[in-house]
Structures are given as structure tokens and as C-alpha cells.
Image (cartoon, rainbow, N blue to C red):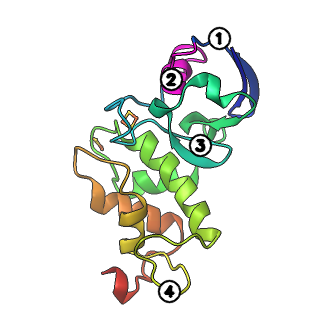
């Protein structure tokens, strides 16, 4: 058993101690937006937010999340109103089959928070964090897309961040 907040609602997950957060989210609240790709922490399809940080739900046990706030793709928008990141993915055709997309969007959401907080990535260098294609590619490198929609995913994220058209030379 684990008492958690899922998308703002208090729920008790009746989870076997061996069950992952991914399987529990999909099977109990029925939040099937979170996808199982590899089930081994390699693809990012299962990305959700745990207390605001992006995590691979296939690598966490549900019981480890006791007292935490979990946000899934279903919790990013407001009912029928899509989150601006989701709208940008549609505008830029940032998917083909869509299987990786919930994880991409959740990861991008947290990634933009990390950028806003000034957290550097491996490509940032010594200066101020400035979002550019290279930064997005590096920071999103944990989310794989077997359809190869990467170029449009990067454009969607930059557009959503208000950065498209302001690409720095370092990012080209
Ligand atoms: Fe979790 Fe692939 S399903 S990282
Ligand atoms: Fe098909 Fe990314 S859109 S795996």
C-alpha cells in the first residue's frame, strides 16, 4: 500500500511490494497514458513527474512513492484543454505513432523547469543556461523515439519555450 497524490488527487495504491510505479499507475487508477516501452530504464516512454522531477516509472516501486506527488501526462492538461507543450507537439508534428509522446511531453515539461532553474547540462559550458537545439537534444536524450521524430520534437519544445527563431550558433 502506498498513499500518494496522483494528478492532484489523493489515492491509495494497493501495490505488491515488487510492483513498479508504472504498472501500478496503469492498472489501478487506469492511467494508461504512461507507456511501457523497454521496462528497463532505457527508453523514457514511462516518464512521469515525482515531486516535480522526471523519473522513469518502470524503475521505481510504487511503495517507494509513499507521500509523494505523482504527475502523469493526464495531469498536465486541464480536462479538454491541452497543455501548451502538447499543443506544440501537434503544431510541429512531433510524433508519428505517438507511443513515446507522453513520456516526451512529461520529460520536456520537467526539462524546461530545470532550464528555468538554471540547472546546467553537459553541453551548457560555463555560461548561463540558454535553451538551444543542442541543449534540448542533450536534455531529452533519455527519451527515445523509434519513429525518429526528433527534429520536430526539438522544434516543438523550443516553440513551447518561446525560443524558436532565437537559436544560438552553439545550438546549430
Ligand atoms: Fe521505462 Fe523504457 S519503459 S524507460
Ligand atoms: Fe513513434 Fe516516437 S512517435 S516512437
Task: Look at mark 3 in the image and give the residue it sits on.
Answer: 49
Which numbered disc flags the more N-terminal residue, 2 or 3?
Answer: 2
Task: Look at mark 2 in the image and give the residue it sits on.
Answer: 20
Give coordinates of residue 59: x percent, y percent: 46, 33
Q: Specify whether tag 2 is near ligand 1 (CB below 8 Å).
A: no
> Looking at the figure, which quarter contains the N terminus?
top right
Q: What element carries label 3?
A: strand
The label shown at residue 14 is: 1
Q: Is mark 4 on a helix, strand or loop?
A: loop
**Rendering quadrant holding ligand 1:** top left
Pick whichever, 65 or 113, lies toward us: 65
Which numbered disc flags the more N-terminal residue, 1 or 2?
Answer: 1
Mark 1 and mark 4: span between their CA atoms? Answer: 47 Å
The quadrant in which residue 16 appears is: top right
Where is 144 relative to 97, above or below? below
Name the residue located 52 percent from the left edge and 31 percent from the top edge.
Answer: 60
Give coordinates of residue 146: x percent, y percent: 23, 43
Residue range corresponding to the magenta coloring: 17-31
Amino acid at each position: 500500500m502506498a498513499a500518494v497524490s496522483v494528478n492532484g488527487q489523493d489515492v491509495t495504491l494497493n501495490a505488491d511490494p515488487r510492483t513498479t510505479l508504472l504498472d501500478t499507475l496503469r492498472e489501478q487508477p487506469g492511467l494508461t497514458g504512461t507507456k511501457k516501452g523497454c521496462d528497463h530504464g532505457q527508453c523514457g516512454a514511462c516518464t512521469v513527474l515525482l515531486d516535480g522531477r522526471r523519473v522513469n516509472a518502470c524503475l521505481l516501486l510504487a511503495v517507494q512513492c509513499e507521500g509523494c506527488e505523482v504527475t502523469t501526462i493526464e495531469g498536465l492538461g486541464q480536462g479538454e484543454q491541452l497543455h501548451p507543450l502538447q499543443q506544440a507537439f501537434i503544431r510541429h508534428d512531433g510524433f508519428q505513432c505517438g507511443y513515446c509522446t507522453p513520456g516526451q511531453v512529461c520529460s520536456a515539461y520537467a526539462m524546461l523547469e530545470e532550464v528555468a532553474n538554471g540547472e546546467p547540462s553537459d553541453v551548457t559550458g560555463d555560461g548561463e543556461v540558454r535553451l538551444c537545439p543542442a541543449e534540448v537534444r542533450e536534455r531529452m536524450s533519455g527519451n527515445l523515439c523509434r519513429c525518429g521524430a526528433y527534429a520536430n520534437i526539438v522544434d516543438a519544445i523550443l516553440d513551447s519555450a518561446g525560443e524558436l527563431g532565437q537559436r544560438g550558433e552553439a545550438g546549430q
